[in-house]
Amino acid sequence: MQVVWFKRDLRLADHRPLWEASRRGPCLCLYIYEPQLLHSPEFDASHLLFINQSLQELASQLRRVGGQLAIRHGTVPEVLDELHHQHGIEALWSHEETGNSITYARDLQVAAWAKRLGIEWNEFPQSGVIRKLRSRDGWAKRREYFLKQPLAPTPTSITCPRYVDSGRLQSAEELGLTPTNKEHLQAGGVAEANQVLSSFLEYRGQDYSSSMSSPVTAFEGCSRLSPYIAWGCLSVKQIVQELGQRRSELRDAKAAGEHIGNWQKSLRSFESRLSWHCHFMQKLEDEPEIEFQNMSRAYDGLREDEFDPGRFEAWCEGRTGYPLVDACMRALLRGSWINFRMRAMLVSFASYHLWLHWRPTAVFLARHFLDFEPGIHFSQFQMQSGTTGINTVRIYSPIKQVHDQDPEGKFIRAYVPELAAVPNEYIAEPHKMPLSLQGKVGCVLGKDYPRPIVEHATAYRQARERIYAVRRESSARNQAIEIMRKHGSRKRPTRS
């Protein structure tokens, strides 16, 4: 019996482990609810809902070609061991995973189990991330080569092993989780993923480059593909190749004299972000320790001893007194998605204005990002918190971001109803409203809405002083050279 172990690859299309296994005899497709992952602080019932929706569709697709999805609960070695004793496993097939410390330790256990029993475990890459990469030199070309290769064929017939119990999907309650009460969650599954991709490439993506930064326009203007990539309803290779086809169509249309608007600029921008996806995941693949440790150890001790639980709680609940910060957090708590610039602002505000260490804030947002991808998540958190030692220090002004991204307060008022009647001139800084106006609009600071948790100018100045004091140290500069050699992008800046 061949066993295909599904993890973050919940699809049939471009699934090489499935294709290879299905050609070699009876093939069991397996998904395992893993207690350690389900009960980790990074997991949320909203993740489970998305997974179950995707698994339900996957099971249906497998049945159409004669296959079967077996669902189990337990540690992976124990589940595999039971299946092996009952039915005999000849080989195990799966995609490589750049996950967190839990999945890394689990994979080591699976490898040991397979070696002990003489069972071959075949793993395949599913993105441009390269395992056991020796040098970043030439990495981009290797990524591009992989993504240009043909998609793995989708099996049209799968021989199903006999007498294997399929198991069933389990709810949050059955798995010991509190059910999610989040609204506006994206639905899981391949059909939904393909619809989102098609709508983006056909019409939603035309103004991507100009609409992705503001939360007013980003919910519609961004691709919204990130959860489907994170949980593997679509492969990056499929997206890259469909993007290439769309760009080719647009070039032909332009050559024929048709007006194509902002499509070329927008799709170039989207393409660059797909490359960022693999670039940041490669960092965690090369150095798993950055899930917990500062990438540059010169920053050790910078924030660890000054963690303020009260500030952390206010940030988590969206009651910092900074309207755009609070609106973004509340939107995230309701729908598990916010656009990239606003994510960066949330992390920047926590790391610099509130001087919170990135690890607890990263875990909190991992739980509330439906598209949580460990490799991207922890690499980005370190970058936005200033602990990589090689990236530009960006301290976002939560006031300027209102003026730039939501000057009329449309997004803010949608998620912070206390500010509904606040005039536009005060929407970025409601604490500057005269007391008489506060009463008139029904928003008394300190009562209806919090006063700013910190004073922006002071927090901004102190953060810059402290982060640059470390950055100027010789040890930090020396480490930056090594970090750049190991993790830095080799892409040359575009000349204007």
Image: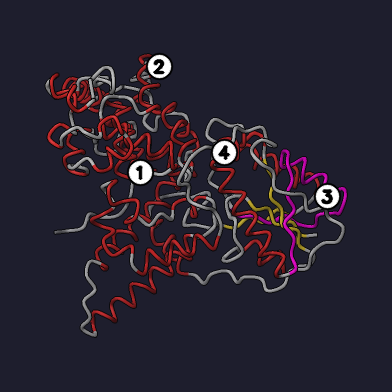
First-in-chain label (4 vs 2): 4
Residue nearest the observer in this picture, 147 or 473: 147
The relative height of residue 303 versus residue 334 in the rendered view (above or below) is: above
Residue to which mark 4 is pinned? 45
Label 1 residue SS: helix
Label 2 residue SS: helix
Give the x, y percent position of residue 244: 38, 71
Label 3 residue SS: helix
In 3D space, how far apart are the residues under numbered discs 2 and 3 (Cα atoms)? 48 Å
Give the x, y percent position of residue 365: 43, 34
Residue nearest the observer in this picture, 406 or 275: 406
Q: Is residue 94 magenta?
A: yes
Instruction: Please state the extent of the stretch shown in magenta in the rendering.
Output: 66-95
In 3D space, how far apart are the residues under numbered discs 1 and 2 (Cα atoms)? 36 Å
Label 4 residue SS: helix
Residue to which mark 3 is pinned? 84
Instruction: Decide if residue 480 is on the left or right side of residue 155.
Output: left
Give the position of the C terminus as an image quadrant. bottom left
- Callouts 1 and 4 close, C-beta under 8 Å: no
Amino acid bearing label 1: Arg
Query: In the rendered image, is residue 318 in sight?
Result: yes
| Figure quadrant of residue 444 | top left
Please tell me whether mark 1 or mark 3 is closer to you in this view.
3
In 3D space, how far apart are the residues under numbered discs 1 and 4 (Cα atoms)? 39 Å
Residue nearest the observer in this picture, 391 or 195: 195
The relative height of residue 131 versus residue 294 in the rendered view (above or below) is: below
Q: Is residue 358 magenta?
A: no
| Figure quadrant of residue 15 | bottom right
In 3D space, how far apart are the residues under numbered discs 4 and 3 (Cα atoms)? 31 Å
The label shown at residue 485 is 1
Residue nearest the observer in this picture, 484 or 434: 434
Circle 2 Cα neighbour tier, 10 Å, few/some/many (<14 / 14–19 / ≥20): few
